[in-house]
Image: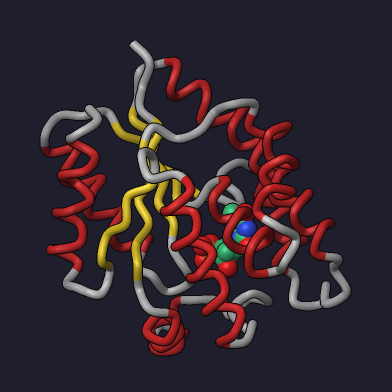
Amino acid sequence: MYGKFITFEGTDGSGKTSIIKEVERYLKIQGYNVVTTREPGGVAISEQVRNVIHDVNNTEMDPLCEAFLYAASRRQHLVQKVMPLLKEGIIVICDRYVDSSLAYQGYARGIGIEKVKEINEYAIDGIYPDLTIFLDVSPKLGIERIMSNQKNHELNRLDKESINFHEKTHEGYLELVKMFPDRIKRVDGERSIKEVSFDCFQLIKGIL
Ligand code: TMP
């Protein structure tokens, strides 16, 4: 039996990491075989690409170059890690996937959602998630969370983007929820970890 591919999306500071940890715990308690991973990264080659993208010195990076690098990193991670796990029947939960590129590079950077989708079709080869959960947190709250969490969070090039960029990314995600209503489900992320993770867990149970 083929596993299920579930992705979490959201603007920076939307709480994906904490929620994924909690959801993984619930699923494991119920006896499901689950592996969590993340983008950009997840395997050695993709982590190296991540380092290039997030290097604070790479201020001259062209937006299209950035989109291609994310797609390249995605391809390697998909082929080397996600696909083999799915083939073994395992539930794969991934922190970010193609929708991050559509919201950040396509919408917020202004390349265009359709163009970035086209670039990514080569990378993902039709492998869309069975379910994508968009954790909806206002960009302002997201930034406040990042700032208060700075001791455990390396401030990367992208965190330094203006509030404007965060707002645009948020708008981009809302656009994606409208474009793909069957696959992308919006969850209010401004509540307690317990409440948010419970809602996510219910959505996941609905596809298992
Ligand atoms: P994170 O590991 O804290 O989620 O940070 C990853 C950053 O990379 C975040 O700011 C979103 C950004 N990103 C993109 O812009 N496009 C992408 O395709 C992906 C996967 C991430």
Q: Residue at x 44, y 80 (%)?
A: 139
Q: Position of residue 13 (x, y in %)?
A: 42, 74
Considering depth in this image, is 195 or 164 the residue closer to the camera?
164
**Picture quarter with ligand 1:** bottom right
**Left or right: 174 with respect to 1?**
right
Horizontal and vertical percent position of residue 160: 63, 84
Across and down, in percent, residue 90 comes to 35, 24
- The structure residue drawn at horizontal position 34% and vertical position 62%, both measured from the top left corner, is 135
143 or 136: nearer the eye? 136
Q: Quadrant of the C terminus?
A: top left
Task: Give the residue drawn at x 59%, y 26%.
Answer: 126
Nearer to me, 153 or 5: 5
* Above or below: residue 148 compared with residue 183: below
- Picture residue at 15% right of the left edge, 29% below the top: 31
Is residue 151 shown to the viewer in this render?
Answer: no
73 up-or-down from 177: above or below: above
Query: Is 133 left, or right, of 54 in this rendering?
Result: left
The residue lying furthest to the front in this view is 178
Q: In this rendering, does residue 153 appear at all?
A: yes
The color scheme shown is secondary structure
Q: Quadrant of residue 35?
A: top left
Residue 169 image offset from top left, x and y in percent: 55, 70
Figure quadrant of residue 168? bottom right
- Residue 82 or 106: which is nearer the viewer? 106
Q: Is residue 170 above or below residue 103?
A: below
Query: Horizontal placement of 55 versus 18: left or right?
Result: right
Which image quarter holds the N terminus? top left
